[in-house]
Image (cartoon, rainbow, N blue to C red):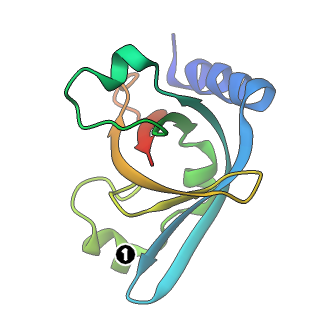
């Protein structure tokens, strides 16, 4: 599967089953925000018992890089230099504002497997 086809399939899934959210990062007092679609589900009880530091009420999130890339989030080179690794991957303390206005805090985020070297999907744990 090509990166384009994989991204299109993910974006269709999120359009159908995801919810609108805002992803926010504050750097030096400046809030950088991007509107995106996210699939958010609560962790199952068995996942909470795995010793990974998860708590009741934590959720697993899947997002696409489509909106992040289009908005060049978090923003220009200055922010990219302030963030270790790929600045598109949320960091602990970033926020997800859900469609009902609930503010959730990113606890961890990781890139999903790359397709031909391209990052298409990011997964997060939020509290």
Instruction: Identify the image quadrant of residue 58.
Output: top left
Task: Return the x and y of residue 35 as percentages of the image width and height.
Answer: 69, 57
The residue depicted at 52 percent of the width and 63 percent of the height is: 73
The residue depicted at 59 percent of the width and 27 percent of the height is: 7
Q: Between residues 96 and 90, which one lies in front from this camera angle?
A: 96
Tell me the element at label 1.
helix
Q: Is residue 3 above or below residue 39?
A: above
Instruction: Identify the image quadrant of residue 72.
Output: bottom right
Q: Is residue 115 above or below residue 72?
A: above
Task: Return the x and y of residue 48 as percentages of the image width and height.
Answer: 34, 25
Q: Between residues 76 and 106, which one lies in front from this camera angle?
A: 106
Q: Residues within 10 Å of mark 1 (few under 14, many from 20)?
A: some
Residue denoted by label 1: 79
Instruction: Identify the image quadrant of residue 4.
Output: top right
Q: Is residue 37 left or right of residue 28?
A: right
Question: Which residue is farthest top?
Answer: 1
Q: Say whether residue 103 is visible.
A: yes
Task: Return the x and y of residue 100 as percentages of the image width and height.
Answer: 77, 53
The residue depicted at 77 percent of the width and 31 percent of the height is: 15
Q: Is residue 58 left or right of residue 21?
A: left
Q: Say whether residue 89 is visible.
A: no
Question: Which residue is farthest bottom?
Answer: 29
Q: Between residues 123 and 42, which one lies in front from this camera angle?
A: 42
Q: Is residue 52 left or right of residue 43?
A: left
The residue depicted at 52 percent of the width and 17 percent of the height is: 2
Task: Return the x and y of residue 19 as percentages of the image width and height.
Answer: 74, 39
């Amino acid at each position: 599967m090509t990166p384009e086809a994989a991204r299109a399939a993910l974006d269709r899934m999120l359009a159908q089953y995801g919810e609108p959210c805002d992803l926010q990062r504050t750097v030096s007092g400046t809030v950088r925000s991007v509107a995106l679609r996210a699939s958010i589900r609560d962790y199952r009880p068995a996942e909470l018992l795995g010793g990974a530091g998860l708590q009741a009420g934590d959720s697993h999130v899947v997002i696409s890089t489509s909106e992040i890339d289009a908005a060049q989030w978090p923003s220009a080179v200055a922010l990219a230099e302030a963030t270790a690794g790929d600045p598109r991957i949320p960091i602990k303390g970033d926020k997800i504002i859900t469609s009902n206005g609930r503010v959730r805090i990113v606890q961890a985020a990781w890139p999903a497997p790359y397709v031909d070297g391209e990052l298409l999907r990011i997964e997060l744990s939020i509290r």
